[in-house]
Amino acid sequence: MGAVVDADGTPLTGATVYLIVEKGGCPSVIETTDADGRFAFTQVQPGLYNVRAEKAGYLTQMFREQATGPHSFGRSIVLTPSHLQDDIKVVLPRASATVSGVVYGEDGRPLPTGGWVFFEDEWHHDMGTTGLPKGRYSVSNLPFGRYYISAVRYSPEANQAVGKRWYYPDTTDKDQATLVTLSEVPMNVDIHFGQPRPAAAIFRVVTDRGFPVARAEITLVRRRDKDSRTRQPVGGSPWQAMETLRTDAAGVAEARGLPSGNYYAFVNKVPPPFASWRNTAVPSTSLDYYATSFHLDHDSGPTQIDFLVSPGLELTGRFVMRDGSVPPSGHGVTIDLCESPRVGGFRGDMSFLAESRRIDETHFAVMGLSSNERYTLREFDADHLKPIVIVGIRMNGQELVGDDIVLSSFGEVNQTLDVILDRAGVVSGTIARRMSGRAVARRVTGDVPAALYPSPASAEIVEGRFVFRGLPAGNYDISLDGRPGVHRVEVRAGRTLEVSF
Protein backbone atom coordinates (compact mmCIF):
# COMPACT_ATOMS: atom_id res chain seq x y z
CA MET A 1 0.00 0.00 0.00
CA GLY A 2 1.07 3.60 -0.25
CA ALA A 3 0.51 7.04 -1.73
CA VAL A 4 1.47 8.99 -4.82
CA VAL A 5 2.32 12.67 -4.28
CA ASP A 6 3.90 15.50 -6.23
CA ALA A 7 7.20 17.15 -5.37
CA ASP A 8 5.43 19.41 -2.84
CA GLY A 9 3.80 16.46 -1.07
CA THR A 10 0.32 17.07 -2.50
CA PRO A 11 -1.60 13.78 -3.03
CA LEU A 12 -2.23 12.99 -6.69
CA THR A 13 -5.68 11.63 -7.51
CA GLY A 14 -6.13 9.34 -10.51
CA ALA A 15 -2.47 8.32 -10.82
CA THR A 16 -1.89 4.87 -12.31
CA VAL A 17 0.24 2.57 -10.16
CA TYR A 18 1.88 -0.65 -11.39
CA LEU A 19 3.14 -3.47 -9.18
CA ILE A 20 5.91 -5.03 -11.27
CA VAL A 21 7.67 -8.34 -10.76
CA GLU A 22 11.36 -7.48 -10.76
CA LYS A 23 13.29 -9.17 -13.60
CA GLY A 24 10.00 -10.15 -15.15
CA GLY A 25 9.22 -6.73 -16.59
CA CYS A 26 5.46 -7.27 -16.84
CA PRO A 27 2.99 -5.36 -14.63
CA SER A 28 1.27 -7.94 -12.45
CA VAL A 29 -1.37 -5.64 -10.95
CA ILE A 30 -2.59 -2.13 -11.85
CA GLU A 31 -4.41 0.24 -9.48
CA THR A 32 -5.54 3.89 -9.53
CA THR A 33 -5.07 6.27 -6.61
CA ASP A 34 -8.15 7.53 -4.77
CA ALA A 35 -9.05 11.09 -3.72
CA ASP A 36 -6.30 11.01 -1.07
CA GLY A 37 -3.68 9.74 -3.50
CA ARG A 38 -3.72 6.30 -1.84
CA PHE A 39 -3.47 2.87 -3.45
CA ALA A 40 -3.36 -0.72 -2.20
CA PHE A 41 -2.49 -4.08 -3.73
CA THR A 42 -3.98 -7.11 -2.00
CA GLN A 43 -3.32 -10.85 -2.29
CA VAL A 44 0.36 -10.24 -3.16
CA GLN A 45 2.65 -13.24 -2.97
CA PRO A 46 6.18 -13.15 -1.46
CA GLY A 47 8.77 -11.91 -3.92
CA LEU A 48 10.79 -8.99 -5.18
CA TYR A 49 8.86 -6.08 -6.70
CA ASN A 50 9.07 -2.58 -8.09
CA VAL A 51 6.30 0.00 -7.95
CA ARG A 52 5.86 2.48 -10.78
CA ALA A 53 3.47 5.44 -10.83
CA GLU A 54 2.47 7.70 -13.70
CA LYS A 55 0.08 10.56 -14.31
CA ALA A 56 -0.39 12.92 -17.22
CA GLY A 57 1.68 16.07 -16.69
CA TYR A 58 4.19 14.34 -14.41
CA LEU A 59 7.29 12.28 -15.02
CA THR A 60 6.81 8.54 -14.57
CA GLN A 61 8.74 7.39 -11.49
CA MET A 62 9.68 4.18 -9.74
CA PHE A 63 9.57 3.93 -5.94
CA ARG A 64 12.59 5.80 -4.51
CA GLU A 65 13.92 6.48 -7.96
CA GLN A 66 17.08 8.57 -7.84
CA ALA A 67 17.11 9.78 -11.45
CA THR A 68 14.55 10.27 -14.15
CA GLY A 69 15.07 8.70 -17.53
CA PRO A 70 14.61 5.53 -19.56
CA HIS A 71 17.52 3.76 -17.85
CA SER A 72 16.76 4.70 -14.24
CA PHE A 73 15.40 2.14 -11.81
CA GLY A 74 13.82 2.51 -8.39
CA ARG A 75 14.33 0.72 -5.10
CA SER A 76 13.16 -2.85 -4.72
CA ILE A 77 10.41 -3.91 -2.35
CA VAL A 78 11.02 -7.27 -0.68
CA LEU A 79 8.03 -9.27 0.55
CA THR A 80 8.89 -12.44 2.49
CA PRO A 81 6.59 -14.89 4.28
CA SER A 82 7.41 -13.11 7.55
CA HIS A 83 6.79 -9.63 6.14
CA LEU A 84 3.97 -9.19 3.66
CA GLN A 85 3.19 -5.50 4.03
CA ASP A 86 4.89 -2.21 3.21
CA ASP A 87 3.70 1.40 3.22
CA ILE A 88 5.52 3.42 0.59
CA LYS A 89 5.38 6.83 -1.06
CA VAL A 90 6.11 7.51 -4.73
CA VAL A 91 6.99 11.11 -5.61
CA LEU A 92 6.23 12.35 -9.14
CA PRO A 93 8.06 15.48 -10.27
CA ARG A 94 6.39 17.60 -12.87
CA ALA A 95 7.43 17.00 -16.46
CA SER A 96 9.54 19.52 -18.29
CA ALA A 97 9.18 18.76 -22.00
CA THR A 98 8.08 21.86 -23.91
CA VAL A 99 6.26 21.94 -27.23
CA SER A 100 4.64 24.92 -28.94
CA GLY A 101 3.37 25.82 -32.37
CA VAL A 102 0.67 27.27 -34.56
CA VAL A 103 -2.36 25.62 -36.12
CA TYR A 104 -3.14 27.10 -39.53
CA GLY A 105 -6.39 27.07 -41.47
CA GLU A 106 -6.86 26.43 -45.17
CA ASP A 107 -6.07 30.08 -45.88
CA GLY A 108 -2.61 29.68 -44.41
CA ARG A 109 -3.38 31.89 -41.40
CA PRO A 110 -3.60 30.90 -37.71
CA LEU A 111 -7.08 29.70 -36.74
CA PRO A 112 -8.92 32.89 -35.70
CA THR A 113 -11.53 31.18 -33.51
CA GLY A 114 -9.17 28.78 -31.78
CA GLY A 115 -9.67 25.14 -30.96
CA TRP A 116 -7.83 22.42 -29.05
CA VAL A 117 -4.56 20.55 -29.38
CA PHE A 118 -4.39 16.94 -28.16
CA PHE A 119 -1.37 14.90 -27.07
CA GLU A 120 -1.38 11.10 -27.19
CA ASP A 121 1.59 8.88 -26.39
CA GLU A 122 2.77 6.19 -28.81
CA TRP A 123 0.31 3.70 -27.28
CA HIS A 124 -2.54 6.13 -28.03
CA HIS A 125 -3.13 7.05 -24.38
CA ASP A 126 -4.46 10.58 -23.86
CA MET A 127 -1.72 12.58 -22.14
CA GLY A 128 -3.14 16.10 -22.25
CA THR A 129 -4.93 18.83 -24.12
CA THR A 130 -4.67 22.59 -24.40
CA GLY A 131 -6.61 25.47 -25.93
CA LEU A 132 -5.77 27.37 -29.09
CA PRO A 133 -6.14 31.11 -28.45
CA LYS A 134 -5.65 32.75 -31.85
CA GLY A 135 -4.31 29.50 -33.26
CA ARG A 136 -1.24 29.31 -31.01
CA TYR A 137 -0.43 26.87 -28.22
CA SER A 138 2.36 26.12 -25.78
CA VAL A 139 2.66 23.19 -23.34
CA SER A 140 5.55 22.67 -20.92
CA ASN A 141 4.43 19.90 -18.57
CA LEU A 142 4.53 16.77 -20.73
CA PRO A 143 6.65 13.75 -19.81
CA PHE A 144 9.53 13.05 -22.14
CA GLY A 145 8.57 10.60 -24.84
CA ARG A 146 7.03 10.20 -28.29
CA TYR A 147 3.63 11.73 -29.06
CA TYR A 148 0.93 12.02 -31.65
CA ILE A 149 -0.06 15.71 -31.76
CA SER A 150 -3.40 16.68 -33.27
CA ALA A 151 -5.74 19.68 -33.37
CA VAL A 152 -9.44 20.39 -33.93
CA ARG A 153 -11.41 23.56 -34.65
CA TYR A 154 -13.81 25.28 -32.27
CA SER A 155 -17.09 26.83 -33.44
CA PRO A 156 -18.42 29.73 -31.30
CA GLU A 157 -21.86 29.35 -32.90
CA ALA A 158 -22.12 25.66 -32.06
CA ASN A 159 -20.11 26.08 -28.83
CA GLN A 160 -18.25 22.83 -29.54
CA ALA A 161 -15.49 21.25 -31.58
CA VAL A 162 -16.32 20.82 -35.26
CA GLY A 163 -14.74 19.00 -38.16
CA LYS A 164 -12.12 16.30 -38.26
CA ARG A 165 -9.06 16.14 -36.07
CA TRP A 166 -5.87 16.98 -37.97
CA TYR A 167 -2.66 15.17 -37.01
CA TYR A 168 0.91 16.28 -37.46
CA PRO A 169 2.16 16.42 -40.16
CA ASP A 170 -1.04 17.73 -41.78
CA THR A 171 -3.23 14.65 -42.14
CA THR A 172 -6.61 13.44 -40.92
CA ASP A 173 -5.50 9.80 -41.18
CA LYS A 174 -4.26 8.70 -37.77
CA ASP A 175 -2.38 5.79 -39.33
CA GLN A 176 -0.32 8.32 -41.28
CA ALA A 177 0.40 10.53 -38.28
CA THR A 178 4.01 11.03 -37.22
CA LEU A 179 5.37 10.40 -33.73
CA VAL A 180 7.08 13.51 -32.38
CA THR A 181 9.91 12.99 -29.88
CA LEU A 182 9.76 15.43 -26.95
CA SER A 183 12.87 15.82 -24.82
CA GLU A 184 14.68 18.54 -22.90
CA VAL A 185 15.06 20.48 -26.15
CA PRO A 186 11.96 22.67 -26.83
CA MET A 187 10.09 21.49 -29.93
CA ASN A 188 8.04 23.51 -32.41
CA VAL A 189 5.22 21.60 -34.13
CA ASP A 190 2.88 23.37 -36.59
CA ILE A 191 -0.23 21.81 -38.10
CA HIS A 192 -1.77 23.03 -41.36
CA PHE A 193 -5.44 22.27 -41.98
CA GLY A 194 -5.89 21.41 -45.63
CA GLN A 195 -2.43 22.69 -46.49
CA PRO A 196 -0.03 19.75 -46.46
CA ARG A 197 3.55 20.95 -46.59
CA PRO A 198 5.80 19.30 -49.16
CA ALA A 199 7.58 16.18 -47.99
CA ALA A 200 11.18 16.67 -46.91
CA ALA A 201 11.97 12.96 -47.17
CA ILE A 202 10.04 10.08 -48.75
CA PHE A 203 10.73 6.51 -47.62
CA ARG A 204 9.57 3.37 -49.37
CA VAL A 205 9.79 -0.17 -47.97
CA VAL A 206 9.40 -3.01 -50.47
CA THR A 207 10.16 -6.71 -50.59
CA ASP A 208 12.88 -8.25 -52.70
CA ARG A 209 10.13 -8.99 -55.24
CA GLY A 210 8.98 -5.37 -55.37
CA PHE A 211 5.82 -5.69 -53.24
CA PRO A 212 5.10 -2.84 -50.78
CA VAL A 213 5.39 -3.49 -47.04
CA ALA A 214 2.75 -1.74 -44.92
CA ARG A 215 3.13 -0.77 -41.24
CA ALA A 216 6.90 -0.90 -41.25
CA GLU A 217 8.36 1.54 -38.72
CA ILE A 218 11.18 3.84 -39.78
CA THR A 219 13.21 5.69 -37.15
CA LEU A 220 14.66 9.02 -38.17
CA VAL A 221 17.54 10.60 -36.22
CA ARG A 222 19.42 13.86 -36.80
CA ARG A 223 23.01 14.65 -35.96
CA ARG A 224 22.89 17.49 -33.44
CA ASP A 225 24.41 20.86 -34.20
CA LYS A 226 27.62 21.69 -32.33
CA ASP A 227 27.99 24.53 -29.87
CA SER A 228 30.08 27.31 -31.44
CA ARG A 229 32.15 27.75 -28.25
CA THR A 230 32.69 24.21 -26.97
CA ARG A 231 32.39 22.42 -30.33
CA GLN A 232 30.39 19.77 -28.50
CA PRO A 233 26.95 18.54 -29.61
CA VAL A 234 24.11 20.66 -28.24
CA GLY A 235 22.21 18.50 -25.76
CA GLY A 236 25.06 16.08 -24.99
CA SER A 237 24.36 13.11 -27.26
CA PRO A 238 25.48 13.51 -30.89
CA TRP A 239 22.12 12.10 -32.04
CA GLN A 240 18.63 13.52 -31.68
CA ALA A 241 15.65 11.21 -32.20
CA MET A 242 13.26 13.03 -34.52
CA GLU A 243 10.35 10.86 -35.68
CA THR A 244 9.08 7.33 -36.03
CA LEU A 245 7.23 6.89 -39.32
CA ARG A 246 4.89 4.10 -40.41
CA THR A 247 4.46 3.05 -44.01
CA ASP A 248 1.01 3.01 -45.61
CA ALA A 249 -0.56 0.35 -47.83
CA ALA A 250 1.76 1.45 -50.66
CA GLY A 251 4.80 0.95 -48.41
CA VAL A 252 5.43 4.72 -48.31
CA ALA A 253 6.05 7.08 -45.38
CA GLU A 254 6.76 10.81 -45.65
CA ALA A 255 8.57 13.15 -43.26
CA ARG A 256 7.57 16.82 -43.39
CA GLY A 257 8.77 20.03 -41.79
CA LEU A 258 12.24 18.72 -40.95
CA PRO A 259 15.00 21.24 -40.19
CA SER A 260 18.12 21.27 -42.32
CA GLY A 261 20.88 18.93 -41.25
CA ASN A 262 22.43 15.50 -41.53
CA TYR A 263 20.15 12.52 -40.92
CA TYR A 264 20.18 8.75 -40.59
CA ALA A 265 17.13 6.56 -41.15
CA PHE A 266 16.68 2.86 -40.53
CA VAL A 267 13.82 0.38 -40.43
CA ASN A 268 13.54 -0.77 -36.83
CA LYS A 269 10.40 -2.89 -37.14
CA VAL A 270 8.83 -4.86 -39.95
CA PRO A 271 5.85 -7.20 -39.78
CA PRO A 272 6.48 -10.97 -39.95
CA PRO A 273 7.72 -12.82 -41.83
CA PHE A 274 10.24 -10.16 -42.85
CA ALA A 275 13.61 -9.74 -41.18
CA SER A 276 15.13 -6.54 -39.83
CA TRP A 277 16.45 -4.49 -42.71
CA ARG A 278 20.16 -4.31 -43.55
CA ASN A 279 21.76 -1.98 -46.04
CA THR A 280 24.25 -4.49 -47.49
CA ALA A 281 24.90 -8.21 -47.36
CA VAL A 282 28.42 -7.73 -45.98
CA PRO A 283 28.68 -7.69 -42.16
CA SER A 284 30.17 -4.49 -40.82
CA THR A 285 30.27 -2.38 -37.66
CA SER A 286 29.78 0.78 -39.72
CA LEU A 287 26.62 2.76 -39.16
CA ASP A 288 26.04 2.73 -42.92
CA TYR A 289 25.53 -1.04 -42.73
CA TYR A 290 22.37 -0.52 -40.67
CA ALA A 291 21.16 2.89 -41.79
CA THR A 292 21.02 5.26 -44.74
CA SER A 293 22.48 8.73 -44.34
CA PHE A 294 21.22 11.81 -46.16
CA HIS A 295 21.36 15.61 -45.95
CA LEU A 296 18.42 18.00 -46.00
CA ASP A 297 18.31 21.69 -46.76
CA HIS A 298 15.38 23.96 -47.44
CA ASP A 299 16.40 24.74 -51.02
CA SER A 300 16.49 21.17 -52.30
CA GLY A 301 13.58 18.93 -53.21
CA PRO A 302 12.45 15.91 -51.20
CA THR A 303 14.93 13.09 -50.66
CA GLN A 304 13.65 9.66 -51.64
CA ILE A 305 15.04 6.54 -49.97
CA ASP A 306 14.11 2.93 -50.69
CA PHE A 307 14.52 0.12 -48.19
CA LEU A 308 14.56 -3.49 -49.31
CA VAL A 309 13.42 -6.28 -46.98
CA SER A 310 13.43 -10.02 -47.45
CA PRO A 311 11.50 -12.80 -45.71
CA GLY A 312 13.36 -13.88 -42.60
CA LEU A 313 13.92 -17.26 -41.06
CA GLU A 314 11.41 -18.97 -38.80
CA LEU A 315 12.62 -20.65 -35.65
CA THR A 316 10.26 -23.11 -33.96
CA GLY A 317 10.73 -24.09 -30.35
CA ARG A 318 9.30 -25.93 -27.41
CA PHE A 319 9.50 -25.86 -23.63
CA VAL A 320 10.82 -29.06 -22.06
CA MET A 321 10.98 -29.86 -18.33
CA ARG A 322 14.33 -31.20 -17.17
CA ASP A 323 12.76 -34.27 -15.56
CA GLY A 324 10.80 -35.10 -18.71
CA SER A 325 7.43 -34.04 -17.31
CA VAL A 326 5.03 -31.70 -19.09
CA PRO A 327 5.52 -27.98 -18.31
CA PRO A 328 2.81 -26.73 -15.96
CA SER A 329 -0.17 -25.06 -17.58
CA GLY A 330 0.20 -21.29 -17.73
CA HIS A 331 3.87 -21.40 -16.68
CA GLY A 332 4.23 -17.85 -17.99
CA VAL A 333 7.61 -18.22 -19.69
CA THR A 334 7.82 -16.61 -23.13
CA ILE A 335 10.86 -16.29 -25.34
CA ASP A 336 11.94 -13.30 -27.42
CA LEU A 337 15.13 -12.91 -29.42
CA CYS A 338 16.68 -9.44 -29.37
CA GLU A 339 19.51 -8.35 -31.65
CA SER A 340 21.41 -5.25 -30.48
CA PRO A 341 24.38 -4.67 -32.77
CA ARG A 342 27.23 -2.55 -31.44
CA VAL A 343 27.46 0.00 -34.20
CA GLY A 344 30.37 2.41 -34.26
CA GLY A 345 29.32 5.97 -33.38
CA PHE A 346 25.74 5.06 -32.53
CA ARG A 347 24.16 3.64 -29.37
CA GLY A 348 20.71 2.99 -28.01
CA ASP A 349 18.34 2.80 -30.97
CA MET A 350 19.98 0.00 -32.91
CA SER A 351 17.89 -2.81 -31.50
CA PHE A 352 15.79 -5.32 -33.40
CA LEU A 353 13.33 -7.45 -31.45
CA ALA A 354 11.78 -10.65 -32.79
CA GLU A 355 8.77 -11.50 -30.66
CA SER A 356 7.63 -15.06 -30.29
CA ARG A 357 4.08 -16.28 -30.76
CA ARG A 358 2.67 -19.05 -28.61
CA ILE A 359 1.38 -22.02 -30.58
CA ASP A 360 0.23 -23.88 -27.49
CA GLU A 361 1.34 -24.29 -23.87
CA THR A 362 4.52 -26.04 -24.97
CA HIS A 363 5.40 -24.83 -28.46
CA PHE A 364 6.27 -21.39 -29.82
CA ALA A 365 7.67 -19.84 -32.99
CA VAL A 366 9.82 -16.78 -33.74
CA MET A 367 9.59 -15.29 -37.24
CA GLY A 368 11.53 -12.67 -39.17
CA LEU A 369 15.05 -13.62 -38.06
CA SER A 370 18.18 -12.75 -40.01
CA SER A 371 20.67 -15.47 -40.83
CA ASN A 372 24.20 -15.37 -39.46
CA GLU A 373 23.26 -12.87 -36.74
CA ARG A 374 23.70 -13.00 -32.98
CA TYR A 375 20.55 -12.90 -30.88
CA THR A 376 20.18 -12.53 -27.14
CA LEU A 377 17.60 -14.72 -25.44
CA ARG A 378 15.10 -12.76 -23.36
CA GLU A 379 12.73 -14.31 -20.86
CA PHE A 380 9.54 -12.90 -19.37
CA ASP A 381 7.64 -14.57 -16.53
CA ALA A 382 4.47 -12.96 -15.23
CA ASP A 383 4.16 -15.24 -12.17
CA HIS A 384 4.79 -13.64 -8.77
CA LEU A 385 6.92 -16.46 -7.41
CA LYS A 386 8.71 -17.24 -10.68
CA PRO A 387 8.17 -21.01 -10.27
CA ILE A 388 9.92 -21.93 -13.54
CA VAL A 389 13.48 -21.10 -14.60
CA ILE A 390 15.38 -21.76 -17.79
CA VAL A 391 18.27 -24.14 -17.13
CA GLY A 392 19.43 -24.95 -20.63
CA ILE A 393 19.03 -24.36 -24.36
CA ARG A 394 19.42 -26.77 -27.26
CA MET A 395 19.66 -25.51 -30.84
CA ASN A 396 18.89 -28.16 -33.45
CA GLY A 397 19.55 -30.77 -30.75
CA GLN A 398 22.95 -29.32 -29.72
CA GLU A 399 23.47 -27.89 -26.24
CA LEU A 400 24.31 -24.17 -26.29
CA VAL A 401 26.77 -22.53 -23.89
CA GLY A 402 27.22 -18.77 -23.71
CA ASP A 403 25.30 -15.54 -23.63
CA ASP A 404 23.90 -15.41 -27.15
CA ILE A 405 22.24 -17.55 -29.76
CA VAL A 406 24.03 -17.50 -33.09
CA LEU A 407 21.41 -18.13 -35.71
CA SER A 408 23.05 -19.46 -38.87
CA SER A 409 20.96 -20.75 -41.72
CA PHE A 410 23.55 -22.65 -43.78
CA GLY A 411 20.68 -23.59 -46.04
CA GLU A 412 18.71 -25.25 -43.25
CA VAL A 413 14.96 -24.78 -43.52
CA ASN A 414 13.77 -26.27 -40.24
CA GLN A 415 15.52 -24.96 -37.13
CA THR A 416 14.37 -25.80 -33.63
CA LEU A 417 15.11 -24.41 -30.21
CA ASP A 418 14.52 -26.50 -27.07
CA VAL A 419 14.18 -24.37 -23.93
CA ILE A 420 14.78 -26.60 -20.91
CA LEU A 421 12.85 -25.62 -17.78
CA ASP A 422 13.03 -26.56 -14.12
CA ARG A 423 11.21 -25.51 -10.99
CA ALA A 424 12.87 -22.55 -9.30
CA GLY A 425 14.03 -22.15 -5.72
CA VAL A 426 13.63 -19.09 -3.49
CA VAL A 427 15.94 -17.92 -0.70
CA SER A 428 14.73 -15.13 1.58
CA GLY A 429 16.42 -13.82 4.68
CA THR A 430 16.42 -11.39 7.59
CA ILE A 431 19.45 -9.43 8.77
CA ALA A 432 19.79 -8.13 12.32
CA ARG A 433 21.13 -4.59 12.79
CA ARG A 434 21.45 -3.86 9.09
CA MET A 435 18.75 -2.12 7.07
CA SER A 436 20.25 -1.65 3.63
CA GLY A 437 22.99 -2.85 1.31
CA ARG A 438 23.17 -5.93 -0.89
CA ALA A 439 23.23 -9.66 -0.39
CA VAL A 440 25.18 -11.88 -2.77
CA ALA A 441 24.51 -15.51 -3.75
CA ARG A 442 27.39 -17.34 -5.41
CA ARG A 443 26.72 -20.69 -7.03
CA VAL A 444 29.00 -23.41 -5.67
CA THR A 445 27.58 -26.54 -7.28
CA GLY A 446 24.80 -27.26 -9.70
CA ASP A 447 24.23 -27.00 -13.41
CA VAL A 448 25.21 -23.73 -15.01
CA PRO A 449 21.97 -22.46 -16.57
CA ALA A 450 21.41 -20.11 -19.45
CA ALA A 451 22.99 -16.67 -19.28
CA LEU A 452 19.71 -15.27 -17.95
CA TYR A 453 20.81 -16.34 -14.48
CA PRO A 454 24.26 -14.88 -13.80
CA SER A 455 26.45 -15.95 -10.94
CA PRO A 456 26.89 -14.33 -8.52
CA ALA A 457 23.34 -13.12 -8.09
CA SER A 458 22.67 -9.92 -6.15
CA ALA A 459 19.66 -8.88 -4.10
CA GLU A 460 18.95 -5.54 -2.49
CA ILE A 461 18.53 -5.39 1.30
CA VAL A 462 15.47 -3.34 2.20
CA GLU A 463 14.72 -2.69 5.86
CA GLY A 464 16.72 -5.73 6.89
CA ARG A 465 15.17 -8.16 4.40
CA PHE A 466 16.19 -9.66 1.09
CA VAL A 467 15.01 -12.35 -1.30
CA PHE A 468 16.62 -14.29 -4.13
CA ARG A 469 13.89 -15.37 -6.48
CA GLY A 470 14.07 -17.78 -9.40
CA LEU A 471 17.31 -19.60 -8.54
CA PRO A 472 18.14 -22.85 -10.33
CA ALA A 473 18.72 -25.78 -8.01
CA GLY A 474 22.20 -26.12 -6.50
CA ASN A 475 24.40 -25.09 -3.58
CA TYR A 476 24.96 -21.38 -2.97
CA ASP A 477 27.04 -19.22 -0.62
CA ILE A 478 24.94 -16.33 0.71
CA SER A 479 26.93 -13.37 2.06
CA LEU A 480 26.54 -9.71 2.83
CA ASP A 481 28.69 -7.68 0.52
CA GLY A 482 31.55 -6.09 2.43
CA ARG A 483 31.07 -8.08 5.64
CA PRO A 484 32.43 -11.44 6.80
CA GLY A 485 30.18 -14.42 7.30
CA VAL A 486 28.81 -16.84 4.71
CA HIS A 487 25.77 -19.11 4.75
CA ARG A 488 26.10 -22.25 2.66
CA VAL A 489 22.57 -23.25 1.54
CA GLU A 490 21.13 -25.90 -0.72
CA VAL A 491 18.50 -24.58 -3.10
CA ARG A 492 16.02 -27.19 -4.21
CA ALA A 493 13.68 -26.98 -7.15
CA GLY A 494 10.34 -25.57 -6.11
CA ARG A 495 11.35 -24.96 -2.46
CA THR A 496 11.51 -21.77 -0.35
CA LEU A 497 14.41 -21.45 2.12
CA GLU A 498 14.65 -18.99 5.04
CA VAL A 499 18.03 -17.80 6.39
CA SER A 500 18.99 -15.35 9.14
CA PHE A 501 22.15 -13.30 9.69
Image (tube, rainbow, N blue to C red):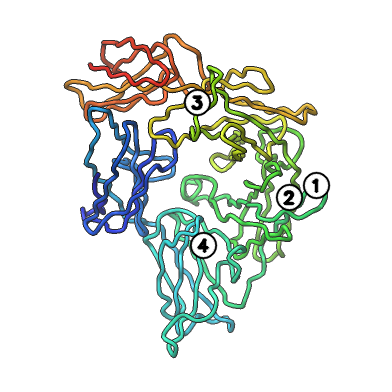
Q: CA distance from mark 1 to mark 2?
A: 10 Å
Q: CA distance from mark 1 to mark 4?
A: 32 Å
Rendered image: mark on residue 208: 1
**First of labels 3, 1 by sequence position:** 1
Q: Amino acid at mark 2?
A: Phe
In this rendering, is residue 314 above or below 222?
above
Secondary structure of the residue carrying numbered label 1: loop
Rendered image: mark on residue 281: none
Instruction: Confirm or deny contact between disc 3 and disc 1 (CB under 8 A).
Output: no
**First of labels 1, 4 by sequence position:** 4
Q: Amino acid at mark 1?
A: Asp
Instruction: Find disc 2 in the rendering and name its residue.
Output: 307
The crowd level at tag 2 (other Cα within 10 Å; few <14, some 14-19, many 20+) is many
**First of labels 4, 2 by sequence position:** 4
Q: CA distance from mark 3 to mark 1?
A: 36 Å
Q: Nearer the viewer, mark 3 or mark 2?
A: 3
Secondary structure of the residue carrying numbered label 2: strand
Which residue is more in the foreground, 356 or 332? 332
Q: Nearer the viewer, mark 3 or mark 1?
A: 3
The crowd level at tag 1 (other Cα within 10 Å; few <14, some 14-19, many 20+) is few
The crowd level at tag 4 (other Cα within 10 Å; few <14, some 14-19, many 20+) is many
The crowd level at tag 3 (other Cα within 10 Å; few <14, some 14-19, many 20+) is some
Quarter occupied by residue 179: bottom right
Q: Amino acid at mark 4?
A: Tyr
**First of labels 3, 2 by sequence position:** 2
- Give the x, y percent position of residue 60: 37, 50
Q: Amino acid at mark 3?
A: Leu
Secondary structure of the residue carrying numbered label 4: strand
In this rendering, is residue 413 above or below 188?
above
Instruction: Find disc 4 in the rendering and name its residue.
Output: 148
Instruction: Find disc 3 in the rendering and name its residue.
Output: 452
Instruction: Confirm or deny contact between disc 3 and disc 2 (CB under 8 A).
Output: no
